[in-house]
Image (tube, grey):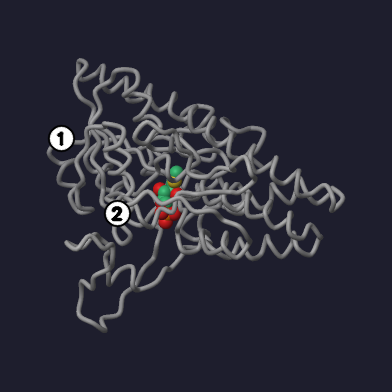
């Protein structure tokens, strides 16, 4: 997407072969672009969230494998890279999907051919992600159009959680793609952006995206969504997902489940936008089977912001020494999900719905 007239993807390869990312830890205060040059840096970039968002984590891992293949294309190196990158973030299934895909392509090749093939496949994974998200946008746009029509062409109010925007993918975003497409199609859309504690991806990233793309929006605290729904201020919710099970349970950023409960109680449609690599066909019961990443206590006890001095830093917001818990994701059961917006269309959130949409993938 464009920032101040320049088109960016969240990850790309320069003509000289260097892989670059937007270091998202500094947004919205600074647009910092950094190269990732070796496996250690790729692992740190994913673990410490220089990049984040399930599809972008997968794309970054793919390039991480490619950079490692240029350094050491042996079988041992390929296998070790799978392990090193896979352990960085346990919940987003796109990470495993991308590592498996790179291994599938590279394993049968002679070592001497692996680096070239790896960069080619990583670039394709990025391009496929962009096209997939574009398709998600076109399907999701129709949902927004239907609501606008029901409102006699009135403004459609969308609530979103975390950042499932272009920064979380290679481009377009998942949850934001329907919004961007609807706006391009002339539909009047307003977005309520959950701040999304603890790391505030909504406040720092989604609000930044909305601002730069001229999207009408309000930043809200995480606890405001239910109140706004009770008062008819939300027409639909669209969120992303880090892993959706074969029966349609949706794992996403912590707090998503509470929004889905509030939506159900207020008859607000609750949609989840996802590319097919985010479906984990090997699991059914999301609550029982998906590993939930527990992150550092400091993400809860501190918040990051720009100080009056202009320095970006962290401040303690609780008594020093108070312990904290920090589960990074939760699971919204399929029964609370109105539909899954995929690149092939909108599927009911059920085993049957997903199997009918992806007969070639479901087992
Ligand atoms: C298109 S991104 C979907 C999800 O990955 C997104 O909603 C989310 O939960 C991101 O979490 P994060 O911890 O920032 O990686």
Rendered view: 331 above or below 323: above
Per the image, the residue denoted by label 1 is 232
Residue 174 percent across, percent down from the top left: 44, 37
Q: Quadrant of the N terminus?
A: top left
Residue 113 percent across, percent down from the top left: 83, 47
Rendered view: 319 above or below 361: below
Residue 303 percent across, percent down from the top left: 26, 65
Q: Secondary structure at mark 2?
A: loop
**Residue 119 at least partly seen:** yes
**Residue 251 at least partly seen:** no
Q: Residue at x 66, y 64 (%)?
A: 83
Residue 20 percent across, percent down from the top left: 54, 49
State how far apart marks 1 and 2 are (Cα). 22 Å
Q: Quadrant of the C terminus?
A: top right
Per the image, the residue denoted by label 2 is 196
Image check: 43 left or right of 250? Answer: right
Q: Residue at x 47, y 53 (%)?
A: 51
Q: Residue at x 50, y 47 (%)?
A: 244
Q: Residue furthest front?
A: 16
């Amino acid at each position: 997407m464009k920032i101040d007239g320049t088109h960016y993807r969240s990850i790309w390869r320069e003509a000289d072969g260097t892989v670059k990312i937007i270091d998202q830890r500094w947004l919205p205060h600074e647009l910092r672009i950094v190269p990732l040059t070796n496996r250690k840096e790729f692992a740190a970039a994913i673990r410490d969230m220089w990049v984040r968002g399930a599809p972008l984590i997968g794309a970054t891992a793919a390039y991480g494998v490619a950079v490692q293949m240029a350094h050491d294309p042996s079988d041992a190196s390929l296998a070790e890279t799978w392990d090193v990158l896979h352990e960085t973030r346990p919940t987003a299934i796109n990470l495993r999907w991308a590592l498996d895909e790179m291994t599938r392509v590279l394993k049968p090749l002679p070592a001497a051919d692996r680096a070239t093939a790896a960069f080619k496949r990583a670039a394709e994974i990025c391009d496929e992600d962009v096209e997939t998200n574009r398709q998600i946008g076109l399907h999701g746009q129709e949902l927004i159009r239907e609501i606008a029509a029901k409102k006699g062409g009135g403004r459609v109010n969308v609530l979103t959680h975390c950042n499932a925007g272009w920064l979380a993918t290679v481009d377009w975003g998942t949850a934001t793609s329907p919004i961007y497409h609807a706006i391009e199609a002339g539909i009047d859309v307003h977005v309520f952006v959950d701040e999304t504690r603890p790391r505030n991806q909504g406040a720092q990233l989604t609000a930044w995206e909305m601002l730069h793309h001229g999207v009408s929006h309000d930043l809200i605290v995480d606890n405001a969504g239910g109140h706004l729904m009770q008062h008819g201020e939300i027409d639909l919710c669209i969120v992303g997902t880090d892993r959706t099970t074969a029966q349609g349970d949706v794992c996403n950023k912590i707090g998503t489940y509470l929004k889905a409960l509030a939506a159900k109680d207020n008859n607000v449609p609750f949609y989840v936008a996802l590319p097919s690599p985010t479906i984990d066909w090997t699991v059914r019961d999301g609550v029982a089977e998906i590993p939930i990443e527990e992150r550092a206590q400091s993400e809860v006890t501190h918040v990051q912001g720009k100080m009056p001095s202009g320095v970006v830093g962290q401040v303690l917001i609780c008594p020093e020494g108070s312990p904290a818990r920090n589960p990074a994701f939760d699971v919204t059961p399929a029964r609370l999900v109105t539909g899954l917006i995929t690149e092939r269309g909108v599927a009911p959130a059920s085993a049957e719905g997903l199997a009918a949409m992806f007969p070639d993938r479901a087992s």
